[in-house]
Image (spheres, rainbow, N blue to C red):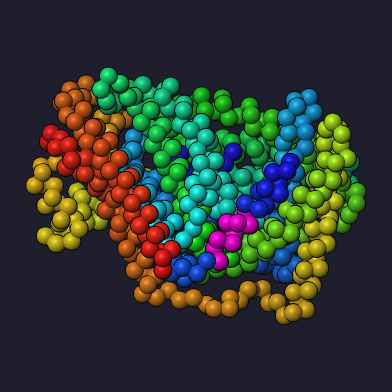
Amino acid sequence: MHMADALLSPAVGGTMWAASSGTIAYCSAKVRKELDDRKVPLMGVLGAFLFAAQMINFSIPGTGSSGHLGGGLLLTILLGPHAAFLTIASVLIVQALFFADGGLLALGCNIFNLGFFPAFVAYPYIYKMIPGERPGQARITVAAVAAAVAGLALGAFAVVLETASSGITSLPFSTFVVLMLPIHLAIGIVEGIVTAAVVSFVYKARPEILQGAIEARPVAGPPLRNVLLAFLAAAILTGGVVSWFASGNPDGLEWAIAKTTGKEELKGPQHGIHGMLAALQEKIGFLPDYSFKKPAEAKSESPGTEGGAKPKREGSKLGTSLSGIVGGLITLLIVFLVGFLLKRRSQAA
Amino acid sequence: MASIEGTILDFRRLDQLATGGTSLHKIDARAKVLVALIFILSVVSFDRYALTALFPFFLYPAVVLALGNLPADYFVKKVALFLPFALAVGMLNPLFDREVMARIGPFDISGGWVSCASIVVRATLTISAALLLVGVTGFPEICRALERLGVPQTFAVQLLFLYRYIFVLTEEGARSSRARELRSFGGKGLGIKSYGSLVGHLLLRTWMRADRIHMAMLARGFTGEFHALQPSRFGGRELLYLLGWSALFIVLRLRNVPDLLGSLVTGAPR
């Protein structure tokens, strides 16, 4: 369920970062306004609890496999949407840094997929509608399963959307959806049942905790609308800017640099590393364009010109790809040597 | 199930690496966080067929590993654990993208294989950047850096709380989990029914613990923020670190250094 950095493009990653940080800022302001100074430590400790709970497995009847709690919905039921979103986000940050689940760029996506949908869609619009004033076991279970399934399915769909719009994997969109959704429906059912089991236990033992969580919600204004608006604004802003930069040129960074400097690529004057590289390059008459990239670009941009563009490069392809591989090996060797020497030095010091 | 203790130990080790006293450890956390982010952004901004152009970026993890005096085998092992996942994602590419991109001797290499390899290299680079950031900075420092970079205080403070109690609560969870396992011969009792009350009890204990912690902190004058013993400064060293790495990443992003080197050595056409 975690998105990985390796599958993301900077435009998508950046947009989702903006969306998630906007939501974090909004939720922080909300939690601060609640003026319940017990809440911040409680959130942190419950986040740590989620870690512990995720490590405890249970066996899934009839399948012989085991699963663990996801916990997004459980936290929302206990803490309310704003505080829960912050807690889920911090759990994901720790996971990204210590267990390399996902990654730093994918963090924005993961926080959104795993935090926003349970906290701001599944909880207020599904979970809260079903149990009513004095919920029984059956009602809690139905509500939790429905909410967990909806939250996870939306999250999984968002993963597909984010991956597809990044364009790093060649997996077709529809195939990916067909692969992802059924699995997450099943996971959602299990998650819902487990959440219901924990919630009904807590409800029996300490009903005031759940009651308190429901009442602690601030009454002012529909929270979802504000969050959605904030998110939409952030997404349109960054998405618009980034995709405008990226459109017409798959290399957004190069394009951005061309735009800001008015040149195709950064060409320093006679001095500096760029001047040096340029001089070196002129001497050996080598054009520093990646041999791997060109045909791909021609293919993705205009299928019509593919036939015309290919034969021209066919001749040089072998040569450049060979030099690329040799150069790559040399680079790795240099990197290894640098690391090794620095290590020797820092150990001697 | 024994792996819970293993996971906690592993977590601890990464946490303790950050207590090292090398010059890299002493650099202000903000510079290190920003450099890691710029590194990841430059790596992922390559198009999907970039492969050798990514290799020079291994310089950053190698230098951090060396200057931070971190155990290389530990990080290599940790990163290697995640490569099967990256490979699993990338493996689908050769099935869908069969166009021949390069030829080495008698072998045709399709675009799918190149982009699959690219995904694995990207994953290696980005995962090691994240792990090394923690190894050389430490989580509490990262939280403080985030707060000073503009992250809301509420969020940063509860992140610190979360971190402080992970060790306590995971150990408690591991104990309960082991106790349940010892009582469940042949796997009976590991089902959802007992799980609900096990985790529910853990939750209630956690809740009461949070109350006690809060009262204890109030009694000691907690006003909603943590104070560092030595507030670090963003000085010239930090600026140099940030600008130096950023410049290098941008150059490496715009120039394909391995291609350049390769053509120097092989004297390739063009």
Left or right: residue B103 versus residue A177 is left
Q: Which residues are magenta?
A: B11-19
- Outermost residue toward the left? A283
Residue at image coords 44%, 66%? B24
In this view, A336 is above or below A316: below
Residue B238 or B14: which is nearer the viewer?
Answer: B14
Name of the residue lying farthest toward the right: A204
Q: Position of residue B179 (x, y in %)?
A: 84, 46
Q: Residue at x 26, y 48 (%)?
A: B254
Q: Is residue A89 left or right of residue B206?
A: left
Q: Give the residue drawn at x 54%, y 63%.
A: B18
Main secondary structure of the magenta stretch: helix
Q: Is residue A340 visible?
A: yes
Q: Is A192 placed left or right of A89 in the picture?
A: right
Residue A344 lies within the magenta run: no
Q: Quadrant of residue B44?
A: top left
Figure quadrant of residue B36: bottom left
In the rendered structure, the answer to whether residue A349 lies left or right of residue A318 reads right
Is B16 magenta? The answer is: yes
Q: Quadrant of the N terminus of chain A?
A: top right
Q: Identify the residue at image location x=27%, y=53%.
A: B251
- Percent position of residue A83, x then y: 68, 58
Quick one: B218 or A229, which is closer to the camera? B218
- Asked whether A331 or A121 is in front, the reply is A331
- Does any portion of residue A287 appear in the rendered image? no
Residue located farthest toward the top when viewing the structure as drawn = B106
**Residue B86: where, in percent of width, then height?**
49, 36
Q: Quadrant of the C terminus of chain A?
A: bottom left
